[in-house]
Image (cartoon, rainbow, N blue to C red):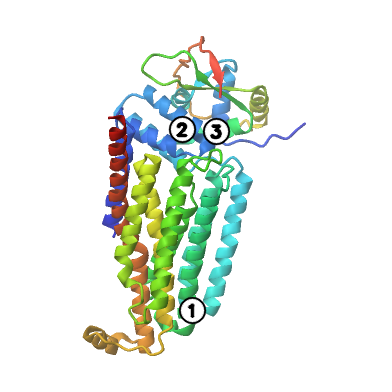
Amino acid sequence: MTRVRRPSAQTMAVLQALAERPDQWRYGYDLCTQLGVQAGSMYPILIRLADRGLLETGWETERAPGRPARHLYRLTGAGRAYASAAAAAAPATSPAPATSPAPATVPRQSRLQGT
Amino acid sequence: MVVTFAALAVTGLALLLRRTGGGDTPARIAAVAANRLPAHRQDWGRAMAAELTQVSGRARRWQFVAGVLRVMLFPPPRHPARVLAAAFGGLLPAVGATVAAATEVPSLSVFAAVAGLLLGGYATVAASRAHRLRPTVPRVAVGAVALAGVAAAVAAMVRIAVAYPAATIDSTHVFSVLFALALTGCLALALSPVSRAGPVDPASPANAVLSWALAGALASGAGLTAVAVTTPVTTDGTTSLLWPAGAAATLAVSAGAAATTRNRLSGIRAGLLTAVLGALMRFALDLTAILQVHHYALTSPYDIAAYAHSGYPSVASYVLSDALAGGILGGLVLYPIALLVVAFLGAAAGAGLRQLGARRTSA
């Protein structure tokens, strides 16, 4: 079995949040509010995950007039496998990341163009 | 000096924010920060700026913008190993230079340590931000001139430290730190990419800025050298009369670059680069010239009175110490700041002339 290097607690929380509904696209700010993570920490995590091919990114194509298109995120196949392996490798005694019950507000009908 | 720097920084930021157009202050800051990200992270900058539209409440918006600024200042490197190598690659020479300075020229050990750390830090930051920066002729030439200028300035300082150690003793370490900061700042300004990485295009604004700056610096250097060679050497240096010439070169370069690129900031950048490269040459030439003096004598009544109580072992040490302090504070710090104001004026004039020309053509 391949040994998975354990990510930081915040990265783990982001992975878990994205893995909850792996097919659904998520917004960066919604992840921030859901996990209680500041943007200055959230975006570097998302950038690193995308660099490693674990995160798929895209831009909204349908958006409200008067505001720019938002960036969307979801795990790739490799990302899902990594999230599962990392969760399995995490010790049971490790503290759970702080989460808030804020629901995801990503519109399901979003269509994407690749970045 | 701190107040001057702060005023310049605030003015520059205000100019940048004004250019970004609509939205509240956090939105403008986010837009500026997004554009300041390295080219390969620009999408992420746009993503963060777009996400800010969903953040409500003044405190939350400022909190979000603080995160955007954090990402702008320290973007995750694409190749962490390369950044680590740059950090070690910068740290080892820094330690080596400090040890060598402490052994050979102890009075320069603080300067060596600070300069090594600053240059190592700059190399690390540059490695984390750079992405396939293509070498162009103007970029390489400006970098070479800046490196030669810094090397000449350090060589002049070392020559003085070896010949007259008392002249370089800096008990407060203020001038050692200032010298290191000024040299690192000059190098950073000359070596940092002018605009985002793109295809090699001789007509691109980045190349135009660098070409204008290079032309201005070479013209300044030629003028300085001519004066240094033809003027009799005195303890006041040989190039002190060339301040107006430096100002004229900065004015011409900033106006030309702003008119060519149709961008005021490009003009300011080119003018400042000219001033900085000229300041390095002037510092090295002045100190080298003063070192050629065979007989050091004090002519000012103030200096004659001050020397008696100064504790310097010789008149030469006193004169050179004075020249060093003046060269660092006046030549490497205040001179570029003063010329930055000239660059602002030149860039405004260049942009205005360009608009006037365009109106006449259309009319």
Residue B233 in the image: x percent, y percent? 37, 82
B90 on left or right of B18? right
Residue B116 as seen in the image, left or right of residue B237: right
Tell me the distance, in whole angstroms, between the alpha carbons under discs 2 and 3: 11 Å
Q: Is residue B351 above or below residue B327?
A: above
Q: Is residue A82 above or below residue B357?
A: above
Q: Is residue B305 above or below residue B351?
A: below
Are tags 2 and 3 found on a single chain?
A: no
Residue wearing tag 1: B159
Q: Secondary structure at mark 3?
A: helix
Q: Which mark lies nearer to you, 1 or 2?
A: 1
Say what amino acid the circle numbered 3 marks: Ile
> Judging from the image, what secondary structure is the residue with disc 2 in?
helix
Instruction: Give the class, few, some or many, for how many residues have Cα within 10 Å of label 1's Cα (few <14, many ≥20).
Output: some
Residue B177 appears in the picture as rendered: no
Subunit bearing disc 1: B
Looking at the figure, which quarter contains the C terminus of chain B?
A: top left
Where does label 3 land, which residue?
A47
| B206 relative to A115, above or below | below
Q: Residue at x 22, y 84 (%)?
A: B302
Q: Quadrant of the N terminus of chain B?
A: bottom left
Tag 1: amino acid:
Arg
- Amino acid type for the residue under numbered disc 2: Gly
Label 1 or label 2, whichever comes before in sequence order? 2
Mark yes or no: residue B275 visible. yes
Q: Residue furthest left?
A: B301
Residue closer to the observer: B37 or B251: B251
Q: Please tell me which residue lies in front, B268 or B160.
A: B268
Residue B322 shown left or right of residue A44 in the figure: left
Q: Position of residue B197 (x, y in %)?
A: 53, 40
* Residue with the mark numbered 2: B45
* Badge 3: residue crowd in 10 Å (few <14, some 14–19, many ≥20): many
